[in-house]
Image (spheres, rainbow, N blue to C red):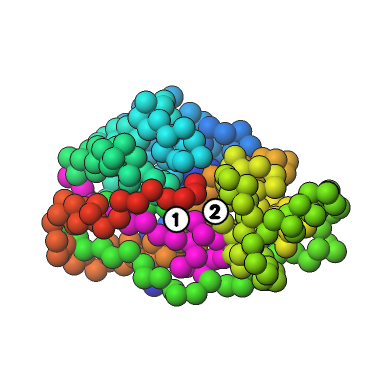
Amino acid sequence: MVTNIFKTIDLFAGIGGIRLGFQYYGCENVFSSEWDKHAQAMYEVNFNEKLFGDINLIKPEDIPDHDILLAGFPCQPFSIAGKGLGFSDTRGTLFFNIESILKAKNPTVFLLENVKRLTTHDSGRTFKVILDKLNGLGYTVYHKVLNSLDYGIPQKRERIYIVGFKDKIQFEFPKPLGFYKPLSEFLEKDEDVPANYFISENLKQKRFQAVKGTPPYPSIWHENIGGNISALPYSCALRAGGSYNYLVVNGVRRLTGREMLRLQGFPDDFVINIPYSQVRKVAGNSVTVSVIKSIAYEIIKALNERQPARVPAIQATLFDMLEEVEVPNEY
């Protein structure tokens, strides 16, 4: 796809998964912000760029002009794995930093990402506040929950994506591919994995006694909050705060750092320069690059074609809110 060179900013950047998806289509990133020092270290070595730290320490008007604002704003205030405090958690108020930047800089489009539970938190009131703020800034807003499993990656990861255009133009979220690649393409050979990744014999026996059914091979064994073990031909969502034994490959070992990044769609030349404990955290906090690529394609297509929106944004929002009110069973 031939595109204009759009300028992006990458807020709450993590290790750069959202940026990668837009960079794939030639977008030029002009500003990045991330406060976690380990995520910073990984971002800087891979993009050769020094990040700005705490977004609270820069005035919105001092951020460079840009076309597309990208932000995977902190999800812990809204997640089941967190305490679900929403805007009463100080991290939840970081959405209002995004609002201030949108108001000051008026980018052409934005993409926001968060956990699925954001849509149902506080009986939907939190999400309504967010949509009202975005619509109030004059953006035509679209949102949808997408699952990484539907975009070629063997990880069940449902996230809400919110896209807004300054003009009233039509946008469609990417259609599911209808398949995901086999786990075998993402996993390393056991003989190439260091011994310290393998769980103890005692724990392994407990897992094999507790697992449901006949495990497929290869599989990733998932332990839920109730202690039940399921063996699946894909991974459940990577979690920043998950226990070391939350996900176990074939019931015998933990995922390596490279495997976790692959399950988030990062290329194998993406440099890992931080300890394993921190790789688990940054991978669990990241986005799935393959999903972002698909959304980026549709955003750039919409900007190039500029078809008028078929349904008023607020009406589309209300329709979507009625489609799904269930509380997800995982973070």
| Percent position of residue 19, x then y | 48, 52
Above or below: residue 29 compared with residue 33: below
In magenta, the rendered stretch is: 138-158
**At 72% from the left edge and 62% from the top edge, which residue is drawn?**
250
| Percent position of residue 116, x then y | 40, 49
Element under label 1?
Answer: strand
**At 21% from the left edge and 48% from the top edge, which residue is drawn?**
139
Residue type (three-letter) at the residue carrying disc 2:
Ala
Label 2–label 1 contact, CB within 8 A: yes
Element under label 2?
Answer: loop
Place residue 169 in its image quadrant: bottom left
Q: Nearer the viewer, residue 126 or 108?
A: 126
Say whether residue 81 is left or right of residue 222: left
Above or below: residue 54 compared with residue 232: above
| Percent position of residue 209, x then y | 74, 57
Magenta highlight on residue 217: no
Above or below: residue 280 compared with residue 95: below
Say whether residue 169 is left or right of residue 26: left
Q: Residues within 10 Å of mark 2 (few under 14, many from 20)?
A: many
Q: Nearer the viewer, residue 226 or 136?
A: 226
Label 2 belongs to which residue? 237
